[in-house]
Amino acid sequence: MFPSNFEYFAPTTLDEALGLLAEHGEEAKVLAGGQSLIPLMKLRFAAPAVVIDINRVAGLDHLEESKRGRGFLRIGALVRNATLERSDLLADRYPTMATAAPLISDPIVRNQGTLVGSLCHADPQGDFGSVMLALDGEVVVKSTAGERRIPIKRFLDGPFTSTIRPDELAVEARVPSPEGRFSGTYLKLERKVGDFATVGVAVFVSTERGKVTRAGIGLTGVGATNIKATEAEAALVGNRLTDATIDEASRLAAAAADPRTDVRGSADYKRDVVRVYVARGLQELSGARAA
């Protein structure tokens, strides 16, 4: 099937792109990697009257760590997943994201797709939504009226729904820089390589003097949107990563999951996979050394 007719714009500046969004609003869709939008258009699940291709806009391909204040990682809207997969910065400083990046779909998708685009698509089976929740990330959006910084837990609003407005452009994702000793991972159950997650679990911990000072757990594919397992995180903070605390955190994470029975497995099965994966991830991290 072919997409319905649409008007195409390829702005070269951010101001031009924002002006087009202000003019066309809900009639427009933004094209970056196109790995979500183009399939939807070909199937006519999406039929925008206007497509705004931002690939020629300068200044949206940055991947860098800012040292201002507490510090944070900046991922521009045009940073490809393949760039994240190969990044030494992520491997050294952001292990949860570095572990997840090679598990995103297949090499063709990773060469074009973007993390920011994936967040805007808000697929509950999207891996990076859970990673961002585990890392307490945020999305920076801009419009002709100004800039907003939206915490990821407020940005992901439901299945394929985010809180970005029609006149806004997501320009980057941000993740707080880790402190002290830290480690992280992403575990994904898939039917075959490149498939969507049946269940995915993102885990991050930082420790000081053997006790957890910061913990993050994000769940993929087990709810109407990616889930932040806040009670499980709270059970870890202030404690050592012992068998008892790991068991409690994995139990609470499984309780936070809200999966549905489908061809990939029963709800009970998926919930138990969450429990096992959280426990497995935390056991792995308990022996990890600081980067």
Image (cartoon, grey):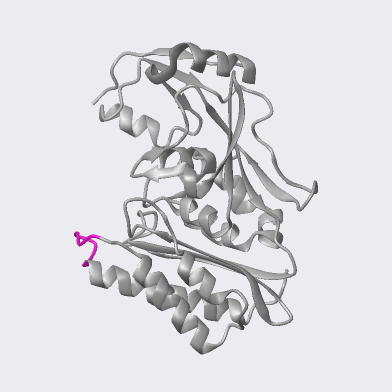
Q: Residue at x 53, y 40 (%)?
A: 116
Q: In this rendering, does residue 78 appear at all?
A: no
Q: Residue at x 62, y 77 (%)?
A: 238
Give the extent of the magenta segment. 260-266
Task: Give the camera-side residue of 20 and 230.
Answer: 230
Secondary structure mostly seen in the magenta stretch: loop
Work out whether 12 lies above or below 192.
above
Q: Residue at x 38, y 17 (%)?
A: 27
Please tell me whether residue 263 belongs to the stretch shown in magenta: yes
Quarter of the image where one finds residue 259: bottom left
Q: Residue at x 53, y 16 (%)?
A: 10
Work out whether 58 lies above or below 182.
above
Quadrant of image for the C terminus:
bottom right
Quarter of the image where one finds residue 255: bottom left
Quarter of the image where one finds residue 253: bottom left
Quadrant of image for the N terminus:
top left
Q: Is residue 268 left or right of residue 69?
A: left
* Outermost residue, bottom side: 243
Task: Give the camera-side residue of 15 and 1.
Answer: 15
Q: In this rendering, does residue 35 appear at all?
A: yes
Please tell me whether residue 133 belongs to the stretch shown in magenta: no
Q: Position of residue 2 (x, y in %)?
A: 27, 22
Work out whether 184 lies above or below 43.
below
Q: Position of residue 158 (x, y in %)?
A: 35, 44
Q: Position of residue 232 (x, y in %)?
A: 47, 71
Q: Count every numbered label the image shows and give the total.
A: 0
